[in-house]
Amino acid sequence: MKERAYAKINLSLDVVGIRDDGYHELKMIMVPINFYDVLEMEIAPEMSMTQNVGYLPLNDKNTVIKAIKVLKEEYGFKENFKINLTKHIPTQAGLAGGSSDGAAAIRLIRKLLKLDMPNSKMIELATKVGADVAFCCMNRPSLVSGIGDIIEPFELNCPFEVFLVKPHRGIMTKKAFEMIDKMDCEHPDVLGLKTALETNDYEQVTKLLGNSLEASSFKLNKEIAKVKAKMLELGFDGSLMTGSGSCVFGITRDHELIERAEKYFKNRGYFVRHTTILNNLYR
């Protein structure tokens, strides 16, 4: 059985503050995009996992393996799985590549074992696997808050195209959050952006894109700021770093602009991807 593990971008990310338990309180607009890894799983006599990349560990740091462990502890099943993961989403990019793989594993096991797992339970278990896994389980444009465990889907009615550029060096999420605790940061209007997306107010969308983590990630990797500035110079209506970076996206309704931008960044050795937002997954 196969499952697509879709990447995400943050159209808005506000670090509201630090909770008593040490986690950061967040408020975000997260959307799935048409860019994905592919996870294949089937029940097997023994556990095995193959991957098309060599950099992912075959232990609990791999979100697929961690997802299986979390579900086994909850449901007590004895089945093993033959797993194959085909990676396309780059790591340390802010695209939830690892989280989307863990979410795909949860959805596949729910189907394969016919588990009685309502969405509320799936979100609870997904949060134990990783920060963005709950959203990636649902895969719908959403207002996401808390530590990523409160997910409120909404209808996105504002079409535009998305262009991704990943700088050569990634960003470790932990370092970006550690740095932001020591500095002032932007607090974007998350709810205002949600309204603009719902009402097809594209001009407001371009104005309200924002990410509290940009300032800290720019300090960790100056190339991110340069990529964003170049995107705006090329003519994108808005540009933003997603998550803690290092991937930057631009939004536009001009298809020819994306073709020009793709040529510019590809010629300089960057990872690029032209994609769109997905609005109707897993209804």
Image: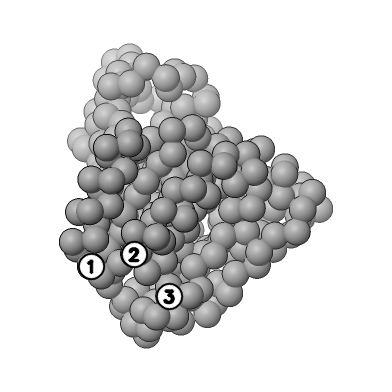
Q: Position of residue 151 (x, y in %)?
A: 50, 63
Q: Which residue occupies 40% across, 25% down?
A: 78
Q: Amino acid at mark 1?
A: Asp
Q: Which residue occupies 57% across, 39% down?
A: 221
Name the foreground residue: 81 vs 129: 129
Task: Give the Cα separation between the discs numbered 1 and 2.
Answer: 9 Å
Q: Which residue occupies 71% across, 50% down?
A: 180
Q: Are marks 1 and 2 in contact (CB under 8 Å)?
A: yes
Q: Can you see residue 95?
A: yes
Residue denoted by label 3: 205
Q: Secondary structure at mark 1?
A: loop
Q: Earlier in the sequence, mark 3 or mark 1?
A: 3
Q: Residue furthest front?
A: 233
Q: Are marks 3 and 1 in contact (CB under 8 Å)?
A: no
**Quarter of the rendering containing residue 278:** bottom left
Q: Earlier in the sequence, mark 1 or mark 2?
A: 2
Q: Earlier in the sequence, mark 2 or mark 3?
A: 3
Residue denoted by label 2: 235
Please name which of the two marks, 1 or 2, marks the residue nearer to the observer.
2
User: Taking 238 as reference, is 76 above or below it?
Assistant: above
Name the foreground residue: 181 vs 164: 164
Task: Give the Cα separation between the discs numbered 3 and 1.
Answer: 16 Å
Q: Position of residue 27 (x, y in %)?
A: 59, 64
Q: Secondary structure at mark 3?
A: helix
Task: Give the Cα separation between the discs numbered 2 and 3.
Answer: 16 Å
Residue denoted by label 1: 254
